[in-house]
Amino acid sequence: MTSPEIKIQLLDVMLKIRMAEEKIVEVYAKDQQMRTPTHLSIGQEAVAAALSLALQTEDQVFTGHRCHAAYLAKGGDFQGFFDELCGRNTGICHGRAGSAHLTDPAAGIFASPILSAMIPVAVGAAMSFKMDLNRKVAVAVFGDAASEEGVFAESINFAVTHSLPILFLCENNLYSTHTPLSVRQPPSRIFERVSIPEMPAEQIDGNDAFLLFEKLKMAVDHVRKLKGPLFIECLTYRVREHVGPMFDYDRGYRSQEEVETWMKRCPVSLLTAQLIKENILSLPQAQAMANNWKCKADDAYKTALKAPWPEAAALEEHVY
């Protein structure tokens, strides 16, 4: 059973992500200071928040282009996040990464926007963890479209064959850019196609933060004990456009009604309502938590705009 303290932490992490991204929505087009494509996780925050609380600090997460939530939840530097999106030298990657490459080794978070690219990297990390006997866990976080790449199957095969300490975590938001899942994949569900005796797999509600934490905590504990990899598919939904801060009802690939239906299942709202119902938080307390992260996001953005740009002489540094 999830403790009240964990439930409050879940909401706090989700609000951290939500307020940071809402700040991006506010300033992205207006100020033109974030000259990077940005892939928002608004509507999907529960997965990253639950995962972060299920992991230990030394565990490592490998994710893709929609990496804000995983980065912020895993403990990536908050100010460095805004500095990076604004291209400043004080950014976590010295202004070179932008939105889709957020990587902070100190926090154990690594990202690449190439579809499925970080799945085999996560497997390699898990292989090193097993060889070093250090009981770390690797987590490969990816979307539904990544399961269509060949390296996805190859990575699972290798991980299962060597019984590696890795969790494969699929954030299924039902779309690959503008293409719905129904026209890209067969009717069977993703977790059903990868489930084998050597790697149990299941599908869960990706907007239920309590359920996510309990399932992911058990999964991480299983993997850490070298009982073999696990696969969890989280059904969720991105509210904003594939890349950018806007809504995209006019693109013709999904309706406003569909988006608004999913917005009623907003994981932040659901969790807030549940905590109030259980008398763990009052509405004013929840609002204060949200306002705290809003103020921090406002301050971080203002600070980022005053930060120095990378020096021209540093153009060839950190290039491999």
Image (cartoon, rainbow, N blue to C red):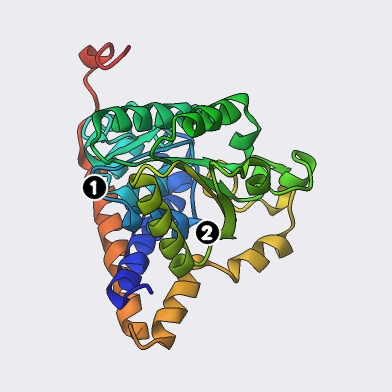
Q: Please indicate, yes or no, whether residue 113 appears anywhere in the rendered image.
A: no
Tell me if residue 151 comes above or below residue 55 in the rendering.
above
Foreground residue among 201 and 16: 201
Q: Residue at x 30, y 56 (%)?
A: 297
Quarter residue 35 falls in? top left
Viewport quadrant of the C terminus? top left
Foreground residue among 286 and 189: 189
The residue that label 1 is drawn on is: 57
Q: Label 2 sits on what residue type?
A: Gly
Q: If you read the primary sequence from the N terminus, does the residue marked by circle 1 or circle 2 appear first?
A: 2
Q: Position of residue 101 (x, y in %)?
A: 40, 32
Tell me if residue 254 comes above or below residue 153 in the rendering.
below
Tell me if residue 179 comes above or below residue 121 in the rendering.
below
Q: Position of residue 254 (x, y in %)?
A: 73, 52
Foreground residue among 227 and 312: 227
Mark toward the viewer: 1 or 2: 1
Q: Position of residue 250 (x, y in %)?
A: 72, 50
Viewport quadrant of the N terminus? bottom left
Q: Residue at x 63, y 47 (%)?
A: 191
Q: Residue at x 29, y 56 (%)?
A: 298
Which structural element holds mark 2?
A: loop
Q: Position of residue 33 (x, y in %)?
A: 37, 39
Foreground residue among 143 and 251: 143
Q: Please indicate, yes or no, whether residue 48 appears anywhere in the rendered image.
A: yes
Where residue 4 is drawn, which disc sits there?
none
Quarter residue 178 falls in? top right
State if disc 2 and disc 1 touch (CB < 8 Å).
no
The residue that label 2 is drawn on is: 43
Q: Label 1 sits on what residue type?
A: Thr
